[in-house]
Image (cartoon, helix red, strand yellow):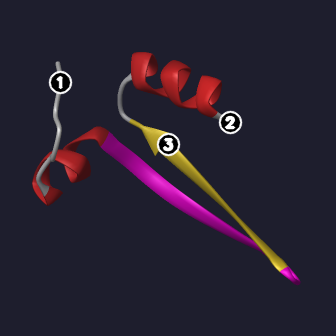
Amino acid sequence: MKLKTPSRSTIKNLISRIVVYDNGNEKEVKVFFKFKELTNIASKLI
């Protein structure tokens, strides 16, 4: 599936949860997807 400009509702349907860690001067954001395939793709982007 290709989406050049996904809608807000599409993004919400793909994401399971978002966790923000505050480590003093830095913040870390982890996005958890509902589908294993998306999690695998996202881990390769980091």
- Identify the mark at residue 32; answer none if there is no mark: 3
Q: Which residue is drawn at 49% across and 58% down?
A: 18
Q: Nearer the viewer, mark 1 or mark 3?
A: 1
| Total numbered labels | 3
Q: Residue at x 17, y 24 (%)?
A: 2
Determine the CA span between mark 2 and mark 1.
21 Å
Determine the CA span between mark 3 and mark 2.
14 Å
Could you tell me if the residues under marks 3 and 2 are in contact, i.e. CB atoms within 8 Å?
no
In this view, the residue farthest toward the front is: 4
Q: What residue type is labelled 1?
A: Lys
Q: In this view, does 44 lie to the left or right of 17?
A: right
Q: Residue 39: x and y, percent?
A: 50, 27
Q: What stretch is highlighted in magenta?
A: 15-25
- Identify the mark at residue 2; answer none if there is no mark: 1
Secondary structure beneath dot 2 equals: loop
In the image, is residue 11 above or below residue 33? below
Ranked by sequence position, the earlier of labels 1 and 3 is 1
Ranked by sequence position, the earlier of labels 3 and 2 is 3
Q: Residue 41: x and y, percent?
A: 50, 22
Q: Residue at x 42, y 16 (%)?
A: 37
Q: In this view, does 37 lie to the left or right of 6?
A: right
In the image, is residue 6 above or below residue 3? below
Q: Is the magenta stretch mostly helix, strand or loop?
A: strand
Q: Which amino acid does label 3 sit on?
A: Phe
Secondary structure beneath dot 1 equals: loop
Q: How crowded is mark 2: few (under 14 residues within 10 Å), some or many (20 or more)?
A: few
Q: Residues within 10 Å of mark 1 (few under 14, many from 20)?
A: few
Ranked by sequence position, the earlier of labels 2 and 1 is 1
